[in-house]
Amino acid sequence: MGSTMRLIEIRELEGPNPYLPGPAIKVEMDLEDDRPDGQWVERWNELLDEPVSLTNLSRTDAADRDTVGEGLSAAIRFAASRAGIDEPRVAVVPGDIATRFVVAFSWDRRPVALALAALAVEITAQVFGTGALDRGRVAALAEALQAATHSPVTDDDRPEVILIGDGPPRLVAITGTNGKTTTTRLVAHLLGRSGRDVGWSSTSGIYVRGEEIESGDWSGPAGARRLIGRTDLDWAILETARGGILRRGLAYDRAHVSAMINVSADHLGDYGVWSTSTLATVKGTVLRATHQDGWAIINADDPLVFAQRHDVPARCCFFTQLPLTDGLREHVYTGGPVISVQDRHVTVLAGAGVETIAPLEDIPLTFGGAARHMVENVLCATGIALSCGLTAREIGSGLATFVSDLSSNPGRLNVYQVRGATFLADYAHNEAGLAELIHLSRTLLRGEGRLWLIVGTAGDRNDETFRALGRMAARTTAHVVPRDTPNYLRGRRPGETTALMDEGVRSTGGEPVALMPDEISAIDLTVAGIRPGDVVAIMASDAPSAVAEHLAQLASAQG
């Protein structure tokens, strides 16, 4: 391929994705540190023996990544034309790293698309490279493309995306960095309680009418496909994580209702995503893949989420915990709904109408409004439920009966009393989650109570994430207990992440209580040191079920 650029990956995306609204082949490349000279038009014509106009490419002494990206786009179109293939739709997207870019093109036959990508990459590498041209290599790849176009078509050739009609089931897709599982469970509760047959997929499993049919993480396309095909459901609620979007694309072409809760730094560095703005675009795929007659539920308090509204084909329903901006007032004035908190009541504003759903004090999930992130989830779920046809009365009644305990919301903000201290276990797995956990924990301190923080997350974060968790925890003046993640080391060595969090704690002048190998041992350590009025907040993201069972046993044994 030459020495001036590197192919990072060619990836098949089966459905809507961050680059195109349908199936796409993603080609990601890195121009690295070298810059090829400006002779690419001449090299193109010499290599392919066919003059071509590249007037959209700037002629400079050295090509930048945008020029090479446009060159790859031109190579894709040229190769398709030579093979007699309909010209694909092509998108060129600069990467977060200055030398990287993505070119994505639409496809409908797998072997043809992959052969087309291989030929286009080779042409680009030679045209923008500085080495000797190799016509034989290009000719061989062109023959492979021709062979693929004439091969028999099989079912496996086609993208796996499912084309959605009017149902059943109708689809709700929920995305965001934090709160997806809780919101999914809450929406399922609201719809199920109102008499709808509901199935949902999430990081904790697949459920049909409240019964678990598969355990494990099913927040990707595979979980969605398991529910979309069921005609015995009125609604399928799909927790939709960024990993599945980046690896395979969405499983469906459009949902009837979509929601985006929030975006914060998490998993940065995976699949070419290095910034929260790009992460927001990835998650925004869910909003963009919404039926034009459907609804998109959007957090107006998160600027990165709110910005996604511009590309949404559906009607928008916004939710906010803040005073209404002029833009939201205009939305309400023109009849668009906004879900907000007015005088400590969850309220629907639309046109001249104001409809009260429920007071925060009557919604157990919000801890009387103290759990801000749970208020966010409640507002989002309210918007979804309204879009699914529920009445304000049905929603208010359902919110009042959803308790964050082992039966309704295991592993998400579960509370236990042990020896006069409050233990708060939550699936907080990043800095934003820890910040909200700390905020709520402080409201639960009693008397001379002290705050304990058991911190840690999965190993597939960069080093600085773990140091940041240590710094954030130490700055609360809490007793900090970094713990390891044996179930989700994800390439890390045992003890590696706790050492990084230890660095973060000590950089603030603090010192951790101890570095523990897992969540259970960390809990037992705190039990030995707590006193009445203390709060122990646990980032329970490694073994949430085991944590819940252990805390329940401790609470039961000690009254």
Image: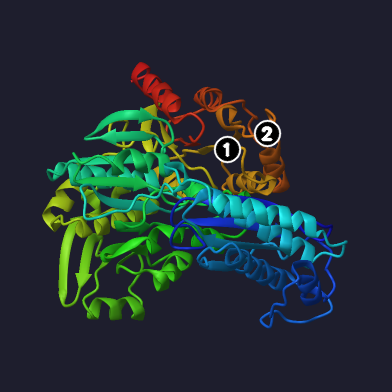
Q: Pointer 1: what residue?
A: 458
Could you tell whether 88 is left or right of 30 in the image?
Answer: left
Residue pictured at 46% horizontal, 68% vertical: 303
Q: Position of residue 446 (x, y in %)?
A: 40, 40
**Which quadrant of the view contains residue 458?**
top right
Rounded to the nearest whole Å, what is the CA distance between mark 1 and mark 2? Answer: 9 Å
Q: Is residue 488 above or below residue 501?
A: above
Residue 431: tell me if it is visible: no
* Front residue (pair 153, 342): 153
Quarter occupied by the C terminus = top left
Tell me the tag on residue 492: 2
Residue 207, position as x, y percentages in the image: 29, 34
In the picture, measured across the screen, residue 3 lies left or right of residue 211, that is: right
Please tell me which of labels 1 and 2 falls first in the chain.
1
**Between 234 and 177, the one nearer to me in the picture:** 234
Depth order, front residue of 251/521: 251
Residue 307: give x, y in percent of width and height: 45, 70
Q: Position of residue 325 (x, y in %)?
A: 36, 77
Instruction: Describe residue 213's horizontal placement relative to residue 373 as left or right.
Output: left
Numbered disc 1: secondary structure: loop
Secondary-structure class at tag 2: loop
